[in-house]
Amino acid sequence: MAEKNILNALTFEQAYQLADVTKTKPVYGALTPKWVARLLEFKGLDAGIYRVNRVVEGDAPLDALCSQDPKSVEIPQGFVPYQTEPREYRLNAIQTILNVDTRVQDVYSSPYDQTAEQIALAAESLRERQESQIINNDDYGLLKNVAEGQKVKTRAGRPTPDDLDELITKVWKEPSYFFAHPRAIAAFEREATRRGVPPVTTSIAGGTFITWRGIPLIPTDKLFVDGLKNPKGKGGKTNILLVRTGEAKRGVIGLFQKGVPGEQSRGLSVRLRGIDDSGVASYLLSVYCSAAVLADDALAVLEDVEVGEYYDYDYK
């Protein structure tokens, strides 16, 4: 057997020692687009408190006369009553402390600034928590603030076009978005396609979404399936929200503290706490947030949505 020839040339392993390596910024796979926080209208507060003054509910706030001859009848009199104990929303603080060794920052900050990258990733983590709190917080979370008359049960577990139509009847005044887990959106697509009415798509803020009756279905994993962001099994139950957003529309709005010291983005503060004797710099990151439902009919929920129904199609 002939002896194997040995290549008389520089090897890849040796050449690697002189080659530049193109590197990415840190990639954090758990991050999401956070569409809920991006698409809700937000209002900045001066003092961390937002009071929702509502009038007392009724068919009409004040009687009025409709007549060709107002002199022949008495014009109704009265006033519009306000709630005497309106609800006040107070901002919650979502905070974390980030530690960075200054020696690492000094020596290993090319091509990427180590401190800046650490702060950016920490800030994204806080934003993830903010979106989860907007939906699930026990005080101001949207799921906890749906009025009883605005709750709808699925007819058969799976989310059908009929179910979403029923939800629209609860938020019929300029509805803005459906919010749902991606598994719930996929389940609805299957149901709509099975009935011969596959949803059309639309583009919003750089994303492409399916729509139903012209209303986009926005994905978020903060509407859990059986209490989980990423359920392992095919089945499971979740909720679908329909919201009207905007203060002028008496809808759902997000709240934040404006003008906080060290503000880097909406309601996000980054402050240097100091450097200890070991040369470790400490940063405090804070997000001040809440959400408010200005009218009961601005928010509705489809409950007990089953995401595990699949169908076999005959393509012959």
Image: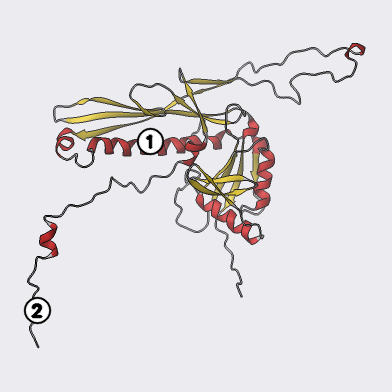
Distance of mark 1 from mark 2, alpha carbons?
59 Å
Q: Amino acid at mark 2?
A: Asn
Nearer mark to the viewer, of 1 and 2:
2
Residue labelled with disc 1:
126
What residue is at 63 percent from the left and 56 percent from the top? 192
180 or 204: which is nearer to us? 204
User: The residue tagged with tag 2: helix, strand or loop?
Assistant: loop
62 displayed left or right of 41? right
What residue is at 9 percent from the left and 73 percent from the top? 7
| Residue 48 percent coordinates (x, y) | 46, 20
Q: Residues within 10 Å of mark 2 (few under 14, many from 20)?
A: few
243 displayed left or right of 79? left
Q: Are marks 1 and 2 in contact (CB under 8 Å)?
A: no
124 displayed left or right of 185? left
> Residue 5 bears which disc, if any?
2
* Quadrant in the rendering for residue 114: top left
* N-term-proximal mark, 1 vs 2: 2
- The residue sitting at the right extreme is 72
75 displayed left or right of 272? right
Q: Amino acid at mark 1?
A: Leu
| Residue 305 percent coordinates (x, y) | 59, 50
133 or 41: which is nearer to us? 41
What residue is at 68 percent from the left and 46 percent from the top? 165
- The residue sitting at the front extreme is 9
User: The residue tagged with tag 1: helix, strand or loop?
Assistant: helix
161 or 83: which is nearer to us? 161
Location of the C terminus (image quadrant): bottom right
Is 100 placed above or below 185 here? above
